[in-house]
Structures are given as C-alpha cells and as structure tokens.
Amino acid sequence: MKKNILTVVIMAATVINLVLTIVLVFSVMPAMNKTSNLIDKVASVIDLEIEDKSKDEEYTMADLEPLDLPYDEKQTWSFTMAEGSEEKHYVQLTGITLSLNMKAEDFENLKTQISTNPVYAKDLVKKTITAYTFDEFDQTKACKECVKKLQEMYDTKAIVDVILVGTLLT
C-alpha cells in the first residue's frame, strides 16, 4: 500500500512539473522575447556601439591620406522610391574620396589596388547610397555604412572614412 501512495505522489509531482513547464513556455518565454526585441530596437535607434575599438582604429589626422576617386563626368543616381511616393529624387556626385590610415599594415597594397581599379569601390558606394529613399538618406550614416562595406569587401581596417564629393540632392 505504501508503494502505491509513493507512486501516486511521484505521478502528481510529475504532472505538476509538466503543467508548470507548459505555463513557463507559453507565458514567460514570449514576454522575454518581446523584451529582448524591444531592447534591440531601442539600442539600434540610439545607435549604440557595443563593440570595443580595436588598435587598428587608433589614428590621428596626420595618419590619414586621402585617395581621390573622381568620376569622368558628374554622376546622377536615383534614390529608391518611398512607398506611396510618385516623385523621384536624385543624388549627384562628382567623385568620392577615401581616407586611408597610413599606419595600417596593408595601406600600400590597398592604395595600389583601389587606385588601379576603383570601379569596385565606386560601385559599392553607388549601391549603398541608392538603397536609401530620399527621406531616409543621411549623408553621415551613409558614409559610415560605405566604410563598413568597403572594409568588409577589401578585408581591411585601413579605410576609415568616405567623403562624397560635390553632393547635390534633388
């Protein structure tokens, strides 16, 4: 008889554990996910940088060398059209200037590579800028995004800034 009571107690504890686990999964976990998503959105809105700055990013203005990538003629690109908008907007550029860190290990190689064949860098900047709508476009943020994409494409930290030369928004 005592074995039967012990079995009933163990079964009851197992059922209670199962019920509490189900409550946890279906009530607490979605709330935690919503909270996590909210924190991610707030952090992206205020543009927090959580990553540590590496030694590659330590430079002074004297360490920078501009690399001009002019266009043969003025370039006119259209922004992505915003939803509900029927008006096209354009950006005009006469060139791009990359700021390169002369203290970076791959500075000379990168400078030669981009100088001899600038088409890839120019195309990446074009794709980045034209992905914006006219209302979303912020030149500072667009230049920072171009820097990140160029660093990834060339696998370097020597590119520290992108300057849009002769920018005109219409």
Image: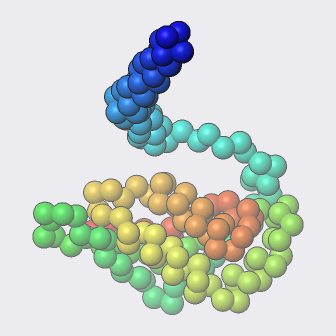
Q: Quadrant of residue 146?
A: bottom right
- What is the quadrant of residue 24 in the picture? top left
Where residue 128 appears, as percent x and y from the top left, is 46, 69
- 110 or 60, which is in the foreground? 110
Furthest-front residue in this view = 1
Q: Residue at x 62, y 40 (%)?
A: 50
Expressed as whole percent of the image width and height from the top left, the position of residue 168 reads 37, 68
Residue 24 visible in the snapshot:
no
Residue 160 visible in this rendered orientation of the protein? yes
- As drawn, which residue projects farthest toward the top? 2
- In the picture, residue 37 is in which quadrant? top left
Give me the residue at 46% from left, 39% from top. Answer: 40
Mark count? 0
Query: Looking at the rendering, in which quadrant would you find the C terminus?
Result: bottom left
Q: Nearer the viewer, residue 170 or 104?
A: 104
Where does the image place residue 139, in percent across and percent down from the top left? 44, 58
Left or right, 90 with respect to 68, comes to left
Q: Tell me which residue sits at (40%, 55%) in the image.
A: 138
Task: Write the residue at 71% across / 42% down.
Answer: 52
Q: From the viewer's side, name the closer residue of 82 and 27.
A: 27
Q: Nearer the viewer, residue 120 or 30?
A: 30
Residue 150 appears left or right of 40? right
In the drawing, does residue 108 fall left or right of residue 16?
A: right
Asked if residue 45 is positioned above or below residue 60 in the image, the reply reads: above
The image position of residue 53, as x and y in percent, is 72, 45
